Amino acid sequence: MYKILVIDDEENIHKSIKPLLEDEGFSVSGTTNPAEGLSMALSADDLSLLILDIWMPDLDGTQVLQAVREKKKNLPILIMSGHANIDTAVQLTKAGANALLEKPFSSDQLLKKIADLLDIKCSSQVPSWLEAINSYPGVYKQTVARQCTIRQSRVLTGLGLHSGIKTGIICMPLPPDSGIIFEDLSTEQRIPALFNNVKSTAYATTLQLDQSGIMCIEHLMAVLNIYGIDNILIKINGEVPIFDGSALKFCEMIEECGIEKQSAPKKKVIIEKTVIVRDSKNHEKYIKAEPFKGFCIDYFLDFPEAFGKQHYLADFSATDNTDVFKKQIAPARTFGFISETKELQKSGLASGAKLENSILIDADKVINTELRFPDEFARHKILDIAGDLYLLGAGLEAKITARMTGHRNNIALIKKILGKSATGV
């Protein structure tokens, strides 16, 4: 039986939580005294979960959290707070919290959070990564390589390109066969990073499930793809930060976290015959996947005369593929035309576009920065493709060739690889 300790100075919280959890089969104890609660938490050898309020008199919940975490490294700790913004989440995660629940909360929200922390299957949960890929028998091949997660949790904060507000991510390890999971901090909805959860591909790739949406995932997904991260939980407040418009911050984050090999074998999608998707409005625009021993992306870009035709081939097949990616692809930044940016801002997008977080083009010249590479635009398109294609849910063994394509075409290629209709692309 799972044993749960609740520490909260509000008696009403205990009166509502205790019978709810006992009805679900949990053994529940609790106290309104934080000092007593700390003693109970430290002395209990068989405690399964600590539920802790953060704002309490005499002894603050953060102090209790830090003291418990110092002694009990692996105990799941769920924090309850009436001020669950991204800054609070960052602070509490750094202090050792595993999850955050904003007050007031519903019984379903509490039970779902507990189920996630204790790895208990809920009937209301969305299909798991393993269930999703198993729905395509024969497509995902088992390899001799082992799955990987991050060794330590990390927090990154920055500005959202489209929302224009401060945002951030909290990255945490997950067990084998979990997949890449985004969790909306405000709704606690978990969204698997899979192509069938893509809501929009307009100027960025956006995932959505029910009422929860996660914007601008492609740069982070590209890094997870090339660094071989199979299982990770990414808690987020709506939009992945843009930073300087490149993926370098995410590379640094994964390297700081460390990579841990796990027991389960990796899955891979191996292209055995050429698959091509042409743009319905312009057949010269296309993206194709063809058989190749490894993974590489070949991109062709036709731009105004001042920039001309750009072409870059990135081969990630070698053992030092992360080094190639970090030096040659990750630094390439998001770019856009001033005219498009103004129109996007009128429609509520690109509110966070700044001189320092994207390459801005006016007619035939870059107006705000020096290019890092002569072909930086083509390299950035490769970054986007590497991120979008990881929404397959596994690595891809193929050569990808693309000309003048974007997020919409990338997702259409996934659908065609898996035998889904690409109508309307």
Image (tube, rainbow, N blue to C red):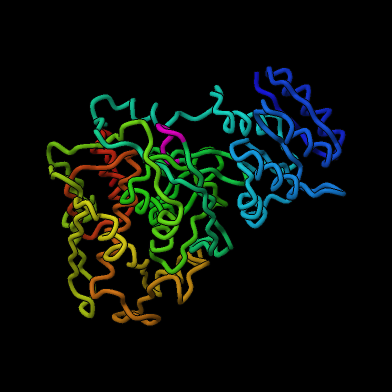
Percent of width and height locating residue 180: 43, 41
Asked if residue 178 is among those painted magenta in the image, a careful observer would answer: yes
Indicate the quadrant containing the N terminus: top left, top right, bottom left or bottom right.
Answer: top right
- Residue displayed at 19% across by 52% down: 318
Asked if residue 113 is among those painted magenta in the image, a careful observer would answer: no
Nearer to the camera, 289 or 38: 38
- Residue displayed at 51% across by 55% down: 239
Question: Quick check: can you spot residue 82?
Answer: no
- Residue displayed at 48% across by 70% down: 353
Number of numbered labels in the structure image: 0
**Which stretch is magenta?**
175-180
**Residue 91, relative to residue 20: is it above or below?**
below
**Residue 411, relative to residue 86: is it above or below?**
above
Percent of width and height locating residue 143: 24, 33
Quadrant housing residue 14: top right
Percent of width and height locating residue 103: 74, 42
Percent of width and height locating residue 242: 46, 63
Question: Quick check: can you spot residue 393?
Answer: yes
Nearer to the camera, 138 or 303: 138
Q: Is residue 87 left or right of residue 376?
A: right
**Magenta span main SS:** loop
Q: Is residue 273 left or right of residue 404?
A: left
